[in-house]
Image (cartoon, helix red, strand yellow):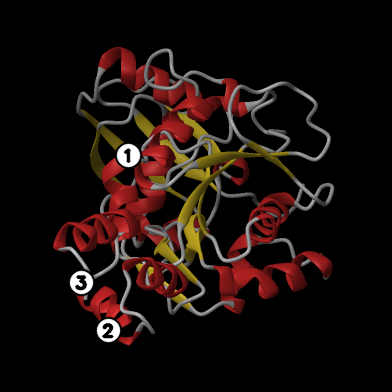
Amino acid sequence: MGLRWRDLEAGLERLKVEDHGFFMVLLNSPRGGVESAQRSAISMNPILHGLLLVGGKSRRMGRDKADLAVRGEESFRDRGMRLLGGVTEKASLSIAADDERSYEIATLPDAIFDKGPLGGILTALESEPGTAWLVMACDLPNIDEETLKLLVASRDVSAEATCFRSAIDGVPEPLCAIYEPAAVEAVRKAVEGDRLCARHFLDELTLNAIDLPSPEALHNCNRPEDMEELRKREASGSTEKAVTLEFFAKLRDEAGCSTKPHTTTAATAAGLWDELRVSHGFTMDLDTVRLAVNDEFAPWDHVLVEEDRLAFMPPFAGG
């Protein structure tokens, strides 16, 4: 056949396809050549690129989240690009259509103005037809290479997307997911119809959804309180504190109790609330819950100490 085993090994390594799939393509190729087999294998297993979403307005944070330092001097932007570059062929930065800043890395400006994450995903899918994209939000301080490797290893190219299930409500997470080329039509229709909620959009795709290896892996930093929790933990470590929790109204019903002792490694009340959302399945976000500490209303950046008594109250109707 004039075909060397070394050629096969190189082709398999470069394409990262399963032996069986590669050899079946090879045997069915008109000339049995490696080059022909490689082209067919690529079409069966689309090449995977990375896309880091940084085009949001960061309204709740009050400044561009991508510029903030996380775990040392590395910014969310640089950390995200490094992680994506480690598990994909190449990574690009998804930026807003009107972002005129100069970057030293590959960028993909949104082709359509102000369409949120789906606009960035559509731009990527249309920019390189036939390419799959591992899409990730920039504000995920707990995401790591092992979590991304699990997502890539679990990839199902016959589905339109491979994603994680939320640790809070089990709903598929859209902003750390792999979108296959076949998803482009559904994304385009959603953007054109202004159906821009990324979580709801996933209901329109055929999905391969997997469990998160860590409940906190996709916790994001949306507010200054989230960043304060992150910095406090980095400074003091994850020390355990015994506190008492009190729940009122809807939260009492969701918790199944009105008061309970609790041991936490959170540094602030905001960090504790995110911890409780995961462990108790609370559906309310921090913005809609009122906090009291030791019988006094308190801000969410309250630093926790041993024997704190924290009360969590949802909005109450009436004056």
N-terminal-most mark, 1 or 2: 2
Q: Which residue is mark 2?
A: 27
* Left/right of residue 256 with respect to residue 287 in the rendered view: left
Residue picked out by circle 1:
144
Q: Residues within 10 Å of mark 3 (few under 14, many from 20)?
A: few
Above or below, comparing residue 107 to residue 150 in the picture: above
Q: Amino acid at mark 1?
A: Asp
State the CA–CA distance, disc 1 to disc 2: 39 Å
Q: Report if residue 215 is visible in the image.
A: no
Task: Give x and y (percent) for residue 253.
Answer: 43, 63
- Between tags 1 and 2, which lies in front? 2
Q: Quadrant of residue 103?
A: top right
Residue 218 placed where, x, y %?
A: 41, 47
In the rendered structure, the answer to whether residue 213 lies left or right of residue 176 reads left
Q: Earlier in the sequence, mark 2 or mark 3?
A: 3
Residue, disc 3: 19
SS of the residue under disc 2: helix
Quarter of the image that includes the N terminus:
bottom left
Direction from residue 22 to residue 136 in the image, left or right = right
Disc 3 element = helix
Residue at image location 37% in from the left, 52% down from the top: 278
